[in-house]
Image (cartoon, helix red, strand yellow):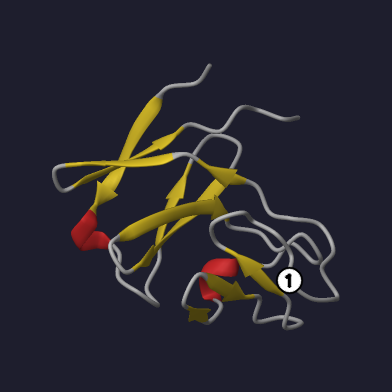
Amino acid sequence: MSEFVKVGTIHDVAPGRPLIHDFDYDTVAIFQVGDEYFCIEDLCTHEEYPLSEGQQEDCRVECPLHGSWFNLRSGEALNLPAVKAVRTFEIKVEGEDLYVREPENVW
């Protein structure tokens, strides 16, 4: 099992302003919703466009390329043209630090 990696602090992210972190094989985006944080792969499953550039509304984010919305908690694609969920990653807060479980290499 992969380990948790510090990706930033709670001050690096705000609603509508995600934190981006690059791992060896994946780029993830951390979103804040109230006092919760969610981490998803930063690529739309339809056209591989960065979701971090999209509009966040509550617990979902819109891909700015074709308008698909994704649930930040589950990764579920909520409307067409995307049909496949984005990967989600475990995130934890310790004090003011944000840690994400490093993605496994799926290639």
Q: Does residue 22 sit above or below 62 in this rendering?
A: above
* Count of numbered circles in the view: 1
**Which of the 4 quarters of the picture holds residue 26?**
top right
Residue at 35 percent across and 74 percent down: it is 15
Task: Give left or right: position of 37 versus 66.
Answer: left
Seen from the viewer's position, the closer of residues 100 and 57 is 57
**Which of the 4 quarters of the picture holds residue 97?**
top left
Task: Give left or right: position of 94 versus 61.
Answer: left
Does the rendering let one see residue 50? no
Binning the other alpha carbons within 10 Å of mark 1 as few (below 14), some (14 to 19) or many (20 upward) gives: some
Residue at 61 percent across and 65 percent down: it is 71
Residue 106: give x, y in percent of width and height.
72, 30
Residue under numbered circle 1: 78
Residue at 70 percent across and 59 percent down: it is 76
Q: Does residue 72 sit above or below 103 in this rendering?
A: below
Does the rendering let one see residue 26? yes
